[in-house]
Amino acid sequence: MAPKTHTWITAWFLLTAPIIAWDVGYCFFTTSVYGGKHPHTNLTGVESGQGGDLHWIWKPYSIYQRVDLVYGVEALERGDGFTNAQSLLNVIETLLNVLYVYLAHVKAWPPASLVGLSAATMTLSKTVLYWVQEYFCNYCAVGHNTMYDAIVYWIIPNGFWIVVPIFIVNRLSRDLAAELNFAAKAAAKSKSK
């Protein structure tokens, strides 16, 4: 039995892959590749036209690193590893997302929904952790923003990574439950013969 697929889930998994790759590129090039000593992506001094030689690729981060200090220069200078840790998990999630699409649409592998559910659960839990960490540190990375900036640049963009995975987890959980119930009924029926 081929897995039940949903266009909107597949679209989310495929459309978010390049966004995540872009974010991971910013994070990893800033610290991991260059050890944080001469960050090529960092946008320090962007107002004066300075910054890393690759900062043009990530120009919107000139705003975001001021909104979310986890992405900012101060976090880089103190060696805060949270941003890269969550970026590494983003890579794993994205690989699972693409694997789900391949297994569900190309291979038609029945347990593919389990891969998609696992990926969406990872995304949801990591993003909730990101938000809860802010709560427990008294909004240490985003509390300096105006309400407008917090809503437009942090809550809405990051909120998508909570809301959409909730819907995906719900849908794929229901699909898997239906498949397990069907299998259980079929097994009981064959046992009674």
Image (cartoon, rainbow, N blue to C red):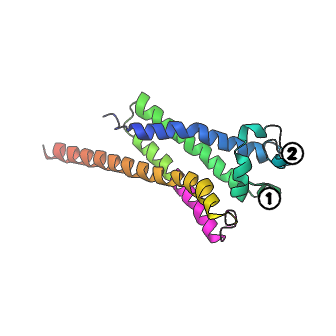
User: Residue 85, percent across and down?
Assistant: 67, 52
10 Å neighbourhood of mark 2: few (<14), some, or many (≥20)? some
Q: Which residue is mark 2?
A: 38
> Which part of the image, by quadrant, shows the C terminus?
top left
Amino acid under disc 1: Glu
Label at residue 121: none
Q: Is residue 147 visible?
A: yes
What residue span does the magenta drawing correspond to? 123-143
Q: Which residue is mark 1?
A: 74
Mark 2–mark 1 Cα distance, whole angstroms, equals 14 Å
Magenta stretch: includes residue 130 = yes
Question: Residue 180 or 18: which is nearer the viewer?
Answer: 18
Question: Residue 90 or 155: which is nearer the viewer?
Answer: 155
Q: Residue at x 47, y 53 (%)?
A: 163
Q: Residue at x 77, y 46 (%)?
A: 30
Q: Residue at x 81, y 41 (%)?
A: 40
Q: Is residue 139 depicted above or below 158 in this figure?
A: below
Which secondary structure type mostly characterizes the magenta part of the structure? helix
Tell me if 115 is positioned left or right of 45 in this view: left
> Which part of the image, by quadrant, shows the N terminus?
top left
User: Residue 22, percent across and down?
Assistant: 66, 40
Q: Is residue 70 visible?
A: no
Magenta stretch: includes residue 27 = no
Q: Secondary structure at mark 1?
A: helix
10 Å neighbourhood of mark 1: few (<14), some, or many (≥20)? few
User: Residue 102, percent across and down?
Assistant: 47, 32
User: Residue 56, percent across and down?
Assistant: 76, 38
